[in-house]
Every structure is written in C-alpha cells, then in structure tokens.
Image (cartoon, helix red, strand yellow):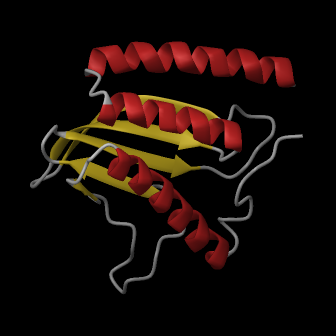
Amino acid sequence: MKKYLFSNFLKEKLIYQTCRDYWEIKVNELFYRNRISDAKAYLNTTFANGTDFYNGNPIINYHFVKTGKAIRIIQEEPNPKDIEIASWIDRFKTDNIEAKELVISIQLTPHSEKTAFELIKKWIVEDYSSKKMERFIELKLELEKIEFMDYI
C-alpha cells in the first residue's frame, strides 16, 4: 500500500496549511543550499478576503526573475489507481511576469516527493533548458509509469 503524506489535506484546513508549510520548508532548504535568493510567489492562492483557496493548485509556486523560470506544484488528492506524478513545461504570462514554468502535478508520497525534487533541481539549480528539461521529464516519468505498472 502506498504511503500518502498529508492524505486529507483537501478536507482539513490545518492539514492543508501543514502540508504547504512542509513544501515551503523543503523547497526553501533546497534554495538555501544552492544559494538561490530570488524566488518569489507569482500566483494568487487566496480570495479577495484573504481566505486560502485550499485546492492544492498550487500548493506552492515560485518565480525566478534572473532566469525567467518558475515552478508550480499542484498537489492532488491521493488515488492509488493513478500515477503519483506528472510534469510538463508551460509558458506563464501576465502583465508583470513572463516565465517558462515547470508544472508538477503530484500525489504526495515519499517516492513522488523525491522525483519532484529531482525535477526542481534540474530546472532551477542545474538550469536545464526547456528542451533538455522536457526530455528529462519524459524519461523520468516513463520510469515512473513502469514502476506504477509493476505496483498494481
């Protein structure tokens, strides 16, 4: 049986906040270790009155001004019949921001978290180009599918 982290995060606001804090601590630790200091949130995650959407899209997001890149983590409700992680490169544009965005859609398990951080590291720390990153994602996620098929 898969071990999901924060499995009731969409139903319980306290679990949701704890999950988001967990992501922020882990991602900021990666940024700190790699001397990345220009990460800023770029997506609104609250209603006009300040109440959080509590929908997991995104659970966290960061824009990196110097590189014109971004990351957005969408945390999904656990579903043992579905693959734990998917990812793609997208373009994000507003009046103030234009970025190439690494999007990771994840059902959070210890294994999928490890994969997500491999993707983030390649994209932000190792500064993979979009084309190289797309190839890496394709290969990495193909391996995830093979493991998933072995599991079910």
- Residue 128 lies, with reference to residue 103, above or below; the image says above
Q: Position of residue 115 (x, y in %)?
A: 57, 32
- Residue 134 lies, with reference to residue 62, above or below; the image says above
Quarter of the image for residue 12 reads bottom right
Q: Residue at x 70, y 60 (%)?
A: 6
- Residue 114 lies, with reference to residue 27, above or below; the image says above
* Direction bottom: furthest residue: 49
Q: Residue at x 29, y 15 (%)?
A: 131
41 sits to left or right of 143: left
Q: Residue at x 31, y 36 (%)?
A: 124
Q: How many marks do you count on the picture?
A: 0
- Residue 119 lies, with reference to residue 130, above or below; the image says below
25 sits to left or right of 2: left
Q: Position of residue 66 (x, y in %)?
A: 12, 43
66 sits to left or right of 147: left
Q: Position of residue 109 (x, y in %)?
A: 70, 44
2 sits to left or right of 84: right
Of 145 and 3, the residue lying toward us:
3
Q: Residue at x 16, y 37 (%)?
A: 67
Of 63 and 33, the residue lying toward us:
33
Of 33 and 91, the residue lying toward us:
33
Quarter of the image for residue 88 reads top left
* Direction left: furthest residue: 95
Q: Quadrant of the C terminus?
A: top right
Q: Quadrant of the N terminus?
A: top right
Observer able to see residue 56: no
Q: Position of residue 122 (x, y in %)?
A: 38, 28
